[in-house]
Image (spheres, rainbow, N blue to C red):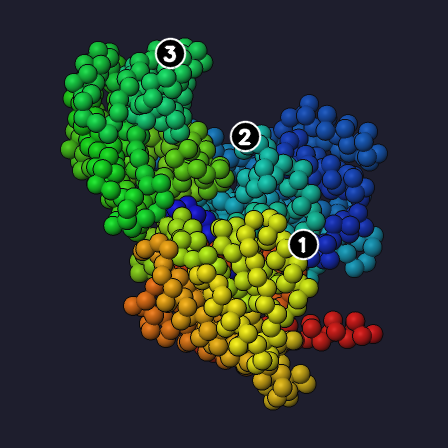
């Protein structure tokens, strides 16, 4: 549902950004291998000076530089670690090392350091890596550890030490003669992502790294006429002792990061040094600063302000509804891990008992189970007695809920009165009544620990914020939860109880039928993230990726968001009704059925149980496809050989169509395209005959076959009432947007679009509906694209997506990424769009001519 929409929007936006706005990043690897000056370091001098050399990135740089053959001068405060690293480098790489012990929070070592540096033969590079960070995010005013002394140490280590060591090393690097002319020496400063984005609750650290960034840029200007170059690397998180993180694709190990950064030596004056960090940085630069500040503040606030640890201090018991599966079960485990006893409310009883036994066994807590069918109203007196028997309640988690099986309109047969009643009872009434029973006890029972709060945590949904079409009752029930939580928060402001609302998007549970991913977390991942936000804010998604998606969707104009959501839900709804095609008739007629999209439609329609009437010009291919369909799907097939550039087969085709029992759908897919983009006037292949053939295949054939099939489709009785038959025409995005250097093709597809829309109106009082799909590039023989991708799907992927849109709207691209592309292109000024299309067409033309020439040669 929403998660799918968000992930698709995110992917499209990501692709758009990559293709049009992040071209410097796309050149990353090319630049890295073509322009890297990593190999020049050995030729520029014999020694590398590295600060913070005993751990993490600094140690990794030492190993890599030693591997390049440079002697290494190591600076750090732990003599034992320094000597261990130095010995390891000497034994492994057979180089010389020197160690220099320095506490960089002090100011007493610079004279000694100057003497040591002067004794080195020549310095190839200086790596200013030493740094000091916060223990955890905290505000400058009230923090326990951010004392004036600690602030002084951060400034001294991150700014002063870097400045002074650079000042000591630089004269020698400039004045010493280069062993090899034409190479450069490098001062490499390790900054931070937080220096670029001014991260709240890391104020002093962030500002110190901004200093490093500014210093490096300014120094680069001063050194432009010397043999020394400066370079700044601004990593995000790296898996080191300082970060406490484990390596992932976005959090590289120190060695992975250092290796990547060294490969960018000499490529650009400033960069993240690691491709994934670079991509993330570019993306964040596109986010409006007001939104970015809010998002960063919330991210930092989670670590700083979470009251998760206060739950045990506020009472002995946690009450959890919907506790037998998914998010509810995950909350039970996490709360038991915190030492809370658990009262579990749900059905079925055997599963509740199983969860309770597991909690008692794993976490040594007490549990109580309360079986309750929340669709009924017969358990509240018993529940009140159970609640009264508890010593004290720390928190109530209202998690129980029920949702639609699939998107559907409010008047459908599945959304019955009984279904509506159950959904409202479970999602609205049960939450309200259980809260009403628990609340007096939570307010009146004395707190075991003064100054902490108890919590009522309600699990809403992102659909409650967005009012999702085709989930009307569910969406409205979650809007109730949102409003109820907000209003209750105001009423409880003078008590020891606080309310909190979590509004997740999709979570991988049995209810969602989804697999875990970064945007669809597991129940445990979600619950853990949500609990870490306890007490941070009264309302939030509870999971960072959901929060980002929610904020992003708030930036989309409401009319477009509503339209997109409606289309997405309709697609999901009609995917469930795709079987209606089988109910409307026995046969599907498909033109251009031997390859690409046409063949894919045949396979999918046969899979749905329809017999297939295949029309194409190659008898051998037709027989092969037909045999495959019969064997794989146990359907009947008929083949009809027709050269659609001719006009000699319509009488025979009419007889064949008349002989079919009933036609469910006609898919006019046959089409003809340019060999390559070319101008209409001077082209070698755009002869009068070629133009005639294209118009005949794309326009005349489609029109005539539709005219032959339509009377039978309208007149034959429907096997099942309330379903429709479909004339589906395959157009092109080129028919919606003027396509230079494909003038005739573009015009034929504009005809198809106009023809379909007009026909749709004519047929509105019949059982037949007309629909057009206008794809962009699909990986097929006609497009000459051999490899499928996100924006150029395989024929089967496109056909599957298009069939899920049958009956949804008259004109659509049939594939979400193409629809999104079309919406973006529509927003472009015509002059800009024309310029872009012209350049693309020229590029395709030149490539085709070049490849053709190579084949001939």
Distance from Cα at disc 3 to Cα at disc 2 = 30 Å
Image position of 143 with respect to 798: above or below? above
Q: Which residue: 46% across, 42% down?
A: 519
SS of the residue at dot 2? loop
Distance from Cα at disc 1 to Cα at disc 2 = 29 Å
Q: In this view, does 128 lie to the left or right of 667?
A: right
Number of residues whose C-alpha sits closer than 10 Å to that of mark 2, classed few (under 14), some (14–19) or many (20 or more): few
**Residue 170 visible within the image:** no
Q: Residue 29 carries which label?
A: 1
Q: List the residue tagged with mark 2.
A: 244
Q: Picture coordinates of residue 46 (x, y %)?
A: 80, 44
Q: Picture coordinates of residue 275 (x, y %)?
A: 61, 49
SS of the residue at dot 1? helix
Distance from Cα at disc 3 to Cα at disc 1 = 54 Å
Q: Earlier in the sequence, mark 1 or mark 2?
A: 1
Number of residues whose C-alpha sits closer than 10 Å to that of mark 3, classed few (under 14), some (14–19) or many (20 or more): many
Which is in the foreground here, disc 1 or disc 2? 1
CB within 8 Å, label 3 to label 1: no
Q: Picture coordinates of residue 259 (x, y %)?
A: 69, 43
Q: List the residue tagged with mark 3.
A: 365
Q: Quadrant of residue 296?
A: top left
Which is in the foreground here, disc 3 or disc 1? 3
Instruction: Say which quadrant the C terminus sits in.
Output: bottom right
Q: Which residue: 40% across, 13% down?
A: 357
Q: In which quarter of the image is residue 159?
A: top right
Q: In this view, does 285 lie to the left or right of 33?
A: left
Image position of 171 with respect to 248: above or below? below
CB within 8 Å, label 1 to label 2: no
Image position of 633 with respect to 35: above or below? above
């Amino acid at each position: 549902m929403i998660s799918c929409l968000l992930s698709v929007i995110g992917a499209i936006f990501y692709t758009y950004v990559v293709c049009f706005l992040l071209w410097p990043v796309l050149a990353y690897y090319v630049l890295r291998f073509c322009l890297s000056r990593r190999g020049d370091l050995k030729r520029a001098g014999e020694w590398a000076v590295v600060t913070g050399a005993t751990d993490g990135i600094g140690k990794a740089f030492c190993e890599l530089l030693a591997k390049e053959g440079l002697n290494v001068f190591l600076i750090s405060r732990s003599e034992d670690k320094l000597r261990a690293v130095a010995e390891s480098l000497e034994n492994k790489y057979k180089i010389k090392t020197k160690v220099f012990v320095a506490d960089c929070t002090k100011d007493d070592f610079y004279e000694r350091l100057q003497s040591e540096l002067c004794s080195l033969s020549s310095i190839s590079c200086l790596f200013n890596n030493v740094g000091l960070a916060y223990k955890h995010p905290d505000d400058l005013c009230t923090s326990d550890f951010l004392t004036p002394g600690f602030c002084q140490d951060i400034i001294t280590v991150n700014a002063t030490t870097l400045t002074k060591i650079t000042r000591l090393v630089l004269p020698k690097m400039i004045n010493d003669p280069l062993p090899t002319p034409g190479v450069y020496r490098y001062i490499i400063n390790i900054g931070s992502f937080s220096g670029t984005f001014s991260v709240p609750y890391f104020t002093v650290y962030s500002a110190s790294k901004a200093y490093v960034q500014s210093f490096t840029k300014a120094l680069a200007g001063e050194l432009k006429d010397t043999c020394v170059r400066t370079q700044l690397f601004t990593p995000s998180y790296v898996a080191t002792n300082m970060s406490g993180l484990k390596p992932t694709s976005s959090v590289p190990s120190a060695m992975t990061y250092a290796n990547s950064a060294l490969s960018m030596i000499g490529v650009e004056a400033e960069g993240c040094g690691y491709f994934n960090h670079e991509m993330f940085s570019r993306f964040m630069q596109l986010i409006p600063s007001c939104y970015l500040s809010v998002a960063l503040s919330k991210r930092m606030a989670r670590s700083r302000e979470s009251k998760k640890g206060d739950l045990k201090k506020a009472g002995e018991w946690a009450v959890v509804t919907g506790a037998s599966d998914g998010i509810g079960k995950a909350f039970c485990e996490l709360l038991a891990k915190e030492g809370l006893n658990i009262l579990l409310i749900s059905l079925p009883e055997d599963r509740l008992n199983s969860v309770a036994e597991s909690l008692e066994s794993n976490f040594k807590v007490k549990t109580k189970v309360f079986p309750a069918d929340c669709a009924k109203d017969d358990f509240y007196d018993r529940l009140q007695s159970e609640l009264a028997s508890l010593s004290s309640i720390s928190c109530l988690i209202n998690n129980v809920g029920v949702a639609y099986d699939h998107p559907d309109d409010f008047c459908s047969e599945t959304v019955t009165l009984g279904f509506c009643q159950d959904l409202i009872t479970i999602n609205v009434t049960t939450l309200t009544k259980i809260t009403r029973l628990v609340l007096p006890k939570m307010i009146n029972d004395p707190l075991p620990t003064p100054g902490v709060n108890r919590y009522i945590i309600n699990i809403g949904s992102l659909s409650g914020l967005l009012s999702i079409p085709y989930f009307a009752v569910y969406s409205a029930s979650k809007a109730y939860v949102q409003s109820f939580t907000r209003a209750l928060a105001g009423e409880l402001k003078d008590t020891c109880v606080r309310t909190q609302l979590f509004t997740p998007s999709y979570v991988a549970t049995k209810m969602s039928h989804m697999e875990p991913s970064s945007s669809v977390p597991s129940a445990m991942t979600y619950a853990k993230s949500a609990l870490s936000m306890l007490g941070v804010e009264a309302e939030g998604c509870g999971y960072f990726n959901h929060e980002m998606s929610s904020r992003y969707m708030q930036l989309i104009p409401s009319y477009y968001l509503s339209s997109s959501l409606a289309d997405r839900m309709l697609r999901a709804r009609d995917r469930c009704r795709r079987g209606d095609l089988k109910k409307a008739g026995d046969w599907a007629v498909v033109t251009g059925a031997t390859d690409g999209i046409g063949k894919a439609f045949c396979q999918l329609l046969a899979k749905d149980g329809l017999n297939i009437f295949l029309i194409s010009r190659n008898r051998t291919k037709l027989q092969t496809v037909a045999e495959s369909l019969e064997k794989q799907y146990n359907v009947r097939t008929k083949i009809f050989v027709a050269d659609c550039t001719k006009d000699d087969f319509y009488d025979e085709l009419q007889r064949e169509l008349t002989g079919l029992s009933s036609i469910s759908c006609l898919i006019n897919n046959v089409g003809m395209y340019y060999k390559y983009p070319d101008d209409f006037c001077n082209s070698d292949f755009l002869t009068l005959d070629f133009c005639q053939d294209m118009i005949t295949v794309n326009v005349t054939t489609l029109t005539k076959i539709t005219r032959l099939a339509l009377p039978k489709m309208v007149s034959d009785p429907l096997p099942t009432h309330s379903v429709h038959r479909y004339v589906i025409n395959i157009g092109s995005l080129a028919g919606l947007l003027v396509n230079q250097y494909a003038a005739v093709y573009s015009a034929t597809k504009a005809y198809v679009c106009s023809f379909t829309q007009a026909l749709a109106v004519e047929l509105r009082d019949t059982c037949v509906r007309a629909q057009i799909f206008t794809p962009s590039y699909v990986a097929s023989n006609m497009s000459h694209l051999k490899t499928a991708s996100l924006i150029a799907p395989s024929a089967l992927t496109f056909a599957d997506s298009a069939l899920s849109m049958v009956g949804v709207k008259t004109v659509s691209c049939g594939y979400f990424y193409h629809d999104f592309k079309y919406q973006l292109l529509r927003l472009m000024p015509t002059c800009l769009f024309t310029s872009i299309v012209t350049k693309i067409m020229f590029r395709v033309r030149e490539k085709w001519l070049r490849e053709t020439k190579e084949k001939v040669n």
